[in-house]
Image: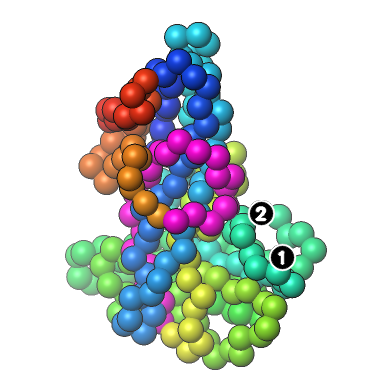
Amino acid sequence: MSSFHKIVIQNLSSDTEQFYVFQQPAVIAANGTDQSVTSTSLGTGTLLPYDQSGTELVFKFDVEFLVGAYSKQTTASQTRIVLAPLVQSNLESSWPITLTPSTEGTEVDNSSNLSPQPLGLSKPAYQQGVPAGNFGIQVPSYTPSAGVDLFCGTAVKDDKGGITLSSYITPPPVSSVFCAPIAKYYIKVGTEAAGNIITFSTGNAALCDFTTGYSTCNVSYNADGSFIVTGK
């Protein structure tokens, strides 16, 4: 049975508000060089004032980390990165994956091999040299093509089974990519559908930090625009 990180939001203001959730960007390196990481929204919802409706907005994300890759033939800039069933020229791939533990000599399924064309990810297996707290993606030689977007990184699954590529890069050919995902999520006022590319910013955001062992974070949005978060 899957376990989830649960976020419960109450709107304590007098106005109907919209909220969206996103994750702390993973630290991603390729061949030892830190990469510029793109972040996406993981979901959004509209919430009436709590004292008028008794309504709460709930997000649940699987505690398991996923390696993900996405490829799309496009004629315009790509604005959404959502892993979903195959549609037209979209290809998506993901697997649950284990981070390398800090204990030396412990072998876990911590790395996957990327096939760019056609897109695919091998089932994760143990790979030496993946740093603790990371999983690896082994990228072969390939020729980037005009009009073809290729991304890989860390993905998140919600309680409905939807999978979104949360933090990603365009991988350099012939590279070892190391991803260090972080179980921290943020809530902001606004509307950003799952998969929408966002500018990561923690300003005026509520931090839901599941690295401390919490399974649930209760988020209150106050009339003055501030947030209060309590974990349990």
Residue interval drawn in magenta: 176-199
Q: Residue at x 59, y 45 (%)?
A: 193
Q: Is residue 230 above or below residue 129?
A: above
Q: In the picture provided, is 173 more to the left or to the right than 182?
A: right
Q: Quadrant of residue 216?
A: top left
Across the whole image, how many numbered discs are drawn on residues?
2
N-terminal-most mark, 2 or 1: 2
Q: Which residue is depicted at the point 49% across and 54% down?
A: 198
Residue 199 location (% of width, % of height)? 44, 56
The percent coordinates of residue 33 (x first, y second) are 33, 81
Outermost residue to the left = 103
**Residue to which mark 1 is pinned:** 90
Q: Residue furthest front?
A: 224
Q: Secondary structure at mark 2?
A: loop
Q: Is residue 194 magenta?
A: yes
Q: In the picture shown, does residue 186 fall above or below 155?
A: above
100 and 88: which is toward the camera:
88
Between residue 6 and residue 148, name the one nearer to us.
148
Q: Amino acid at mark 2?
A: Ala
In the rendered image, which quarter is residue 207 located in? top left
Residue 28 as seen in the image, left or right of residue 146: left
The disc label shown at residue 84, or none = 2
Query: Quadrant where the C terminus lies?
Result: top left
**Label 2: how many Cα within 10 Å (few below 14, some 14–19, many 20+):** some
Residue 187: x and y in percent read: 41, 38
| Residue occupying the far right of the picture | 88
Residue closest to the eye, 197 or 98: 197
Left of 229 or right of it: where is 65?
right
Residue 71 shows in this picture:
yes
Task: Determine contact: label 2, label 1, CB under 8 Å.
Answer: yes
* Magenta highlight on residue 140: no
